[in-house]
Image (cartoon, rainbow, N blue to C red):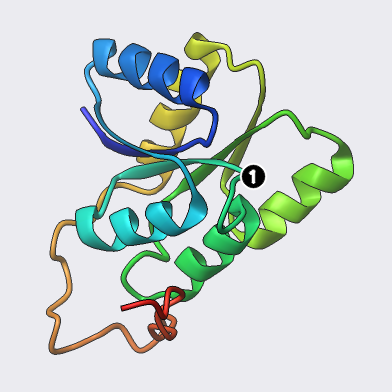
Amino acid sequence: MAKILLAEDDEFSRDMLSRRLQRAGHEVIAVADGREALRNALQQRPDVILMDLDMPLMDGGSAMRFLKSDVRTFRIPIIVLTAHASPHDVATAVADGCQSFEAKPVVLRRLLERIEEALQAFPPKKSAASPLMPNPAAPTAPADPDPAP
């Protein structure tokens, strides 16, 4: 199935979703904040990212904006998982780069449908472009968001 990066700061929610996604056949990389999400997205190259909006160190909106501006990660679909589901919150998340939005509490069946839709709309690209010949239409890689050594 898919390699999924799950960025969720609530330990109970993160563990529960992780187990349920693994039972559905997915490989899950679970992280607790936006900076960990960035590092793991760059290193692990997931097929889909599930992103909470309210997280410590870096919120989900900031993490999404970085991921969508980076040539290495801009094609990875992001599904927002959040308790904030007002029309303004949805519009902001879409503007920040999410492809889909799922309000909490998460209904697994609906989330699995969103993941499948994202995979069909944005099929994972496995080394399609040469690292020496970047796509000229793609964004450039911004500076590292975590300047710590």
Closer to the camera in the image, 110 or 10: 10
Nearer to the camera, 58 or 81: 58
Q: Which residue is mark 1?
A: 53
Left or right of 11? Residue 131 is left
Residue 74: % across, % down:
42, 66
Q: Is residue 60 left or right of residue 117?
A: right
Give the position of the N terminus as an image quadrant.
Answer: top left
Residue drawn where x is 39% and y is 53% of the image: 36
Please tell me which residue lies in front, 116 or 81: 81
Within-10-Å neighbours for mark 1: few <14, some 14–19, many 20+: many
The residue located at (77%, 54%) in the rendering is: 92
User: Which residue is at 58% across, 66% downward?
Assistant: 65
- 3 to 95, vertically: above or below: above
Q: Is residue 113 visible?
A: no
Position of 136 with respect to 8 (left or right) is left
Q: Visible in this render: residue 72?
A: yes
**Quadrant where the image shows the C terminus:** bottom left
Measured as percent of width and height from the top left, residue 137 is found at 41, 84
* Amino acid type, residue under disc 1 in the picture: Leu
Secondary structure of residue under mark 1: loop
47 relative to 65, above or below: above
